[in-house]
Image (tube, rainbow, N blue to C red):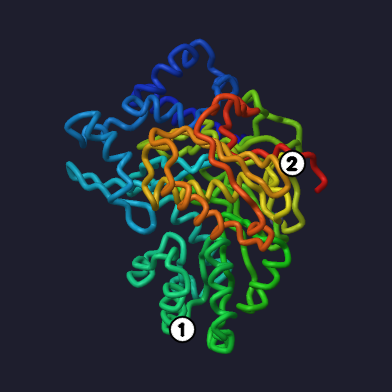
Amino acid sequence: MNQSNQKKLEKLFLYLYYNNSYFHDLLQNMAYSNNNIQDIYRSLRPITKDEIRNNITKYLSKDFINCFQSYDEMISELNDVSNLSLNHDKVISKNGHKWYIETTSGTTGKPFAVIKNNNELLIEAAYLYKFRKQLSPEGIDNGFLLDHPIDPVLKEINFRKGHESYEVVFDHMLKKNPKWIFSTALILKKYVDYIIKNDKYKFLKKISLDFIETTSQTYTVEEKKHIEQIFNTKIINNYGTREFWNIGYQCSSGQLHLNNEYLIVDIVDEHGESINEQGKIGEVIVTSLTNKSMPFVKYYLGDLARIIQGCNCGWNGPIIILEEGRKNEKLVNTKYFGNVVFRKVLKGIYINHKFNDLKRIKIVQDGGYHLSIYVDKEKKFDMYFEEKFLEISRNVVDDINFNKFSFDFIYEDFDSVLTDSIYKEQIFVSDISHGN
Ligand SMILES: [Zn+2]
């Protein structure tokens, strides 16, 4: 942690101690007995989404809580995914304040509302703007955002409709003649698929992109090269989430440099202890030095990564290297990691299809081409749920071998299927011997 961030952290803790009930309780035993901010920081446990959910009435800023008549009203607004935009967000205006609620899902796909005020949002937007402007000094205001769109046409696009929606996107792109594109890797892959299948490639010559920025990277090296060829530009990786729009941004040497302007990013082991050894793999936790509406202090993300120092691009900041998953998270006989693809599937189940009686789910690969899906759900033997689960899975797991898979849904014995980290709810595990 650099000196400037140490100062900011000290100020943040002081603010939270006096203005936030959850952190008041958490910090009160250490705030005055120990004046070393680094020691206080080290002794705090990572905070998970479940921990926040369970303490939500104390966790959020009083300004936000006071916007509602009761805690019940506030909680039902936070849990309500029926009024989200296609971009999975909504705006709440109350008492002269404006709040942005962005819904994310994390490692389990379960919806989780992230709250920010206008100021907090602007800080994140400005940070990304800075990098994008370096890559496209002339075209910075002419971006084409397929993820988190602001363009009114793109805002109405429902990508789940497949080629029908990509046609609208393509026509609109030719009209706008953008200088850069922002997209998730999945949408971008499907977009390229549409372009090739419909013989639209020739029209792309009219467009000259400075770069494509992608987030949620799930493509192979070959797929990346292919997309770069199609659009005749480079792909830049942005490691970000809804909680933190940018955690790491790719430099000219292809490395993800950590955002240490207003974030503290650390790696912890399975017990939640910080890993200080350079290059050792662990799970990512993040502290935001600016967010106070919904504070994030040692917030557990669950992504697997390691941090190293030194890059030949000339930028001095630490580099994060993301690992797609553990060995037992590989979906054997496909090119995917099960934890990555099934997180997307579950996000579709919870948010797009609004199954709200699903408590827990665990997908176990117990044969080369067999998945057992353990479901803890109020309605048992739900054919509609099974149908949707398989439909979304086939859409997300874009691999020919996946057609050979068979599935069993099991609605009992949930607790017999264990997880191996006290923080992480592992939704997928491969239980067969490795090496295919
Ligand atoms: Zn670099």
Residue 153 placement (x, y as % from top left): 35, 72
- Residue depicted at x 33% and y 69%: 152
Image mark for residue 174: 1
Is residue 116 shown above or below 211?
Answer: above
Which image quadrant is residue 255 in? bottom right
Residue 55 at what x, y percent from top left?
A: 38, 25
Vertical comparison of 353 with 231: above or below: above
Between 219 and 370, the one lying in front of the other is 370
The image quadrant that residue 402 belongs to is bottom right
Q: Amino acid at mark 2?
A: Lys
Give coordinates of residue 205: x percent, y percent.
58, 88
Ligand 1 falls in quadrant: bottom right
Q: Of circles 2 and 1, which is in front? A: 2
The residue drawn where x is 39% and y is 42% is 114
Callout 1, which amino acid? Leu
Residue 129 visible in this rendered orientation of the protein: yes
Q: Say what secondary structure mark 1 lies in.
A: helix
